[in-house]
Image: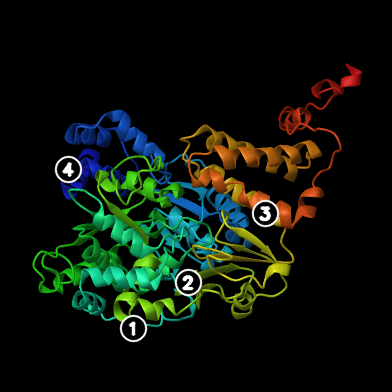
Amino acid sequence: MTPDPAEAAATAMARHRHDPHELLQVLREVQESCGWITPEAIDCIQARLGLPRSKILGVATFYSFLHINPCGRYRILFSDNITDRMLGNQVLLDRMCRNLWIERGKVSEDGLVSVDSTSCTGLCDQGPAILVNGIAITRLSEARVDEICDLVREQIPVGDWPAEFFRVDENIHRRDVLLGTPWLPGAALQAAMARGTEALIGEMKASRLRGRGGAGFPAGLKWQACRDAPGKARYLVCNADEGEPGNFKDRVLLATAADAVIEGMTLGALATGAWRGFIYLRGEYRFLLGHLEGVLERRRAAGLLGESILGREGFDFDVAIHVGAGAYVCGEESALIESLEGKRGTPRNRPPYPVTHGYLGQPTVVNNVETFASSCLVALKGGAWYADIGTRESSGTKLLCVSGDCARPGIYEYPFGVEVRQVLEDCGARKTKAVQVSGPSGACVPAAEFGRRIGFEDLPTAGALMVFDESRDMFQVARNFVHFFAHESCGFCTPCRVGTSLLTQMMDKLANGHGSPYDFAEIEKMNLILQSMSHCGLGHSACNPVLTTIAKFRPAYLRRLAHEEFEPAFDLDRALGAARQMTGRDDPAAHVLPEEAT
């Protein structure tokens, strides 16, 4: 029986203490209960939280996993990253739509099911993957698609589907100091408390540990800046919203080393004086929520979270989990904070920076999952020991998420400075044409540059490393990335909102055989506009995949310039073909006449 929407909303609001900042969590939980966010639920939230209806609707319509209209009791989304495409996700999507007699992107007439695609789900090492009612299913095949269709038709609850469908492997193929160190809960905290707070920050600075989310800001300096900033309270945020296609290391760390991640957050609290922390868990990793809540409970029971941690009076710190709802831009730290405050995830103008004006306007540290986990190594073994690993500008190790054309996709941990060539050899890549480092916003590296090294001095990366062999068309790779950015633009600024859409249209025009040198020049002009005028990093980097593939694989573009003169993208006569077929009329008057004949 479908729960009463008002009752579901009231229950969710009570669980979140009727705090308006928890609006996103309330909406997400209402949808989990009712299947969608009904007008009755919105009425109840508006009355109880005292929020304008426009704000509730603004938040509910910002996140792609939330729905204010009925969307099918089974909501199936195919991951549409380029590696999923390489594994045949489009054929499988079409097969599912045929089996269920449903049109992609629409709800079946009986309201039973909807099938569509979404951006990368963080399962590139075991795709093609889908989300069913928000829960991940891996290793899709034709047989598995057919089984899923049978289960949907028989209306079997998702919780009763075969457990094998939901198996998510860790696929760790190479361990170093981070993944290879056995974690004893509390050990890093005890070591840090023995040294003292000042010494902890000193060790962090000495380690030269830089943020692992991509920007690479020194973690020790950030912790010190937060501690020294004026404010009534301080907060810590663990950014686990890794939405960059090709990235999945946070998923593996949270599944296998959640104790280290949360202990790293507690070290940050000791250093900065923060009393509250959040793990911002991307919506696609909803399946990890129960596991993480269990780890938090266990640590509270062991005196490693809560009041008087490890018996120290006044050392109070606890962590809450905030589950995202499908917005890539929330990986940007200021957008993430907006989302934590129950708003649309729109990036803020900077400065001021979150370290002085973050969550609720107070000093806030936002660090990546891998950064917090790595800080435990610094606390345990000292800054000098850590700084001795890696390179001069990039100390420590880096987790690389390898996917694409290789025999062993998965997680590889190396000291910074490893050559791309070494990674390819270890993962079993053959006849490799190119490697995309750090996802669509990163660098495309051709075979002649496989001697380049992973590190801030050469190839900085948040972790993604996608492999493309000689059979791949790099134009189509860039086209997939451009569509990704257009889909994920938050729409706040016109250059990004319009520019990413125009860029996709230009790439589609080339792909459809209407390209000319005019379009090539327009793409390059659009790249300049996006880079110089966009509000945040998404717009700035949206043109990167096109720029890099034009520079490194120009023939892939040149062979699509099928016309010497400008050619319109829209062919009216071809568009009328469907109408001619439906009416059975194909006489000359049913065609658009050539200009010279009119």
Q: Earlier in the sequence, mark 2 or mark 3?
A: 2
What residue is disc 2 on?
399
Query: Which amino acid, mark 1?
Result: Pro
The residue tagged 3 is 548
The residue to which callout 4 is attached is 18
Where residue 531 appears, as percent x and y from the top left, is: 58, 43
Distance from disc 4 to disc 2, alpha carbons, whole Å, reads 39 Å
**Helix, strand or loop at mark 3:** helix
Residue 200 is left or right of residue 127, and the answer is left
**Which three-letter amino acid code belongs to the residue tagged 2?**
Leu
Mark 4 crowdedness (10 Å alpha carbons): few <14, some 14-19, many ≥20: some
Q: Which residue is mark 1?
A: 182
Q: Is residue 166 visible?
A: no
Say whether disc 1 or disc 4 marks the residue closer to the N-terminus: 4
The Cα atoms of the two marked residues, 4 and 3, are separated by 48 Å
Distance between the alpha carbons at the discs numbered 1 and 4: 40 Å
Mark 3: amino acid: Thr
Mark earlier in primary sequence (3, 1)? 1
